[in-house]
Amino acid sequence: MERWDIHGTDAQLPDGSTAWSVEYDTATDTYRSLRLQTNLFCAGGALLADGRVASLGGAGNMSDARVGTLGDGQRSVRTFGSWPGADWVEAVAGLATGRWYPSAANLPDGRVLVVGGSSTGVEFNGGETNVASFEVLGGGGGTQQQPTPLQFLWDALPANLYPVTAVLPSGRVFVFAGNGQLFNVTASTIIVHVGSNLWPFRSYPWTGSGALLPLDPADNYTARVLICGGSMLDCGWGCVTKDCHDNCQSPAATALQTCGLLAPDAPGPQAWDMSDTMPAGRVLADLVHLPDGTLLLINGAHAGMAGTNLGRNASLEAWQYAPLAAPGARWRRLNATTVPRVYHSTAVLLPDARVLVAGSAPNDPGSWGDPTAAPNAYATERRVEYYYPPYLTGGGRRPAVAAVSAMDGLGYGSAVQVLVGSVDPSVVVAGGVDFALVQSGFRTHSTGHAQRMVWLAKTALEVSSAEGGQALYEVVTPPTPEVAPPGWYMLFAVAAGVPSVAAWVQIGGNPSPLQL
């Protein structure tokens, strides 16, 4: 049985106003409220190569008795450090253009790509609000180039906010909003559309889930992108007017059961492989890498869409996707959860291999100080949960990363020794200990910005035959920054499918620091 621990409370600043950000300690379930200068509502984000969190863009200024005053955050770049007592550092004009609902990705040179968004808060993006461009941050300063137009984001209207982004081992960037496009960020050139339209809509506000599947040296780090779910109303591409939007906004939208799988780096025209149908339709769900190489799909609903009070029939089911299983047999149901989580929910992998699950804020009017308003279908959810995947509840012996020969400043293609303890010697002899790098990325609105997992090549050097003994391995870091962009990753040892608690390692240094 998968197990859930539930905790919940309000977060406030010393002056009694609501905190828009906290630092949460998952070991003690305590938090520290943080103060913001600008409005980060519906921002994008990334984990920088030096370990800081970056929050990018957001909403306009606001002043409210409960939340205090926040400045215009649409062009803001905010960073938060990993050291004790850190607080947000903000550059209110860090972006070249305002962006609400943008996506981000970590580039091989250490800079951060920021893609798309709208110029103001909207239920749907349209011709007057569409920010159809990308820009790049880093390289020793703030914005390093003016925005580059992306016609692709015009073609994808009205479903083009929070597009799925993935940096591929070829160095090209894949962006998905209805269909996929490859482009070269350094040269600011569009390469090619890949994959036909994955109709119906899969991007916000008919929000599906997407991820770059684990990269593996055994198949030369072949990139595959999985896009699942979403919801459908027959609005048609190019729906940009208010009348069209009004006809497309409904909690009755049918959640999609289908998934598309694409190898965007493969040569020639690509078609979506539609073999992997989910157990049921799902919208507003989170797709999270697990250290055993599978993915967890959690949260969301069986009907509706993103936006105020538009999610219906919340799904309490957790599903697991196994990329190495046979086509058509990759999904399985896990045990049901108990807390409905729809719009504005999130999930993220922790270093101890649990998954933190939080949120669900469908903009309930009672949460905004109007107790007389009719309640939404689902109220704002303040409880935090921990999900225990099957590998933590099946009784298998859990390995431990006892020592790593180097943990920061690791280069590419470098040999690193890892001492693994508490491991069954028969598992080691059978080759059953594997090693994975996982970066959880920045997660919001069912999108995992820069989420990534890479398996490592490994060789067993020494094995103790004693019960609960140790094994010394040599693992080789990814060969290029295109396979694993510079940054901090969780290093897991996985013995017979059971992961260790991760050790943090830094790959590739910090070649293009972002300075505010």
Image (cartoon, grey):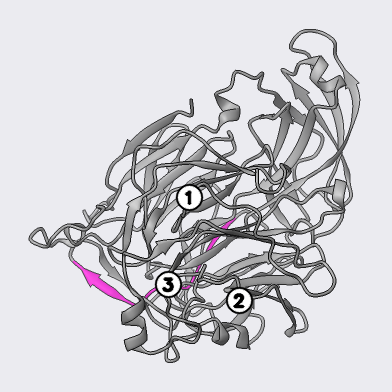
Tell me the amino acid under the disc marked 1. Ala
Q: Quadrant of residue 144?
A: bottom right
Vertical placement of 307 versus 329: above or below?
below
- Sequence-first tag of 2 and 1: 2
As drawn, is 280 to the left or to the right of 321? left
Q: Nearer the viewer, mark 2 or mark 3?
A: 3
Write the residue at 67% across / 64% down.
166
As drawn, is 112 to the left or to the right of 239? right
Q: Which residues are magenta?
A: 52-64
Residue highlighted by disc 1: 280
Residue 339 coordinates in the image, percent (x, y): 34, 41
Residue 48 appears in view = no
Vertical placement of 31 versus 287: above or below?
above
- CA gap between label 2 and label 3 equals 17 Å
Tell me the amino acid under the disc marked 3. Gly
Residue 192 coordinates in the image, percent (x, y): 75, 81
User: Mark 1 Cα within 10 Å, few/some/many (few <14, many 20+)?
Assistant: some
Residue highlighted by disc 3: 58
Vertical placement of 436 versus 82: above or below?
above
Residue highlighted by disc 2: 142
Write the residue at 55% across / 81% down.
156
Q: Could you say which is closer to the camera, residue 480 or residue 445?
A: 445
Q: Could you say which is closer to the camera, residue 149 or residue 197?
A: 197
Residue 296 coordinates in the image, percent (x, y): 56, 44
Q: Quadrant of residue 393?
A: top right
- CA gap between label 3 and label 1 equals 33 Å
Residue 22 coordinates in the image, percent (x, y): 39, 50
- Sequence-first tag of 3 and 1: 3
Vertical placement of 512 versus 456: above or below?
below
- Sequence-first tag of 2 and 3: 3
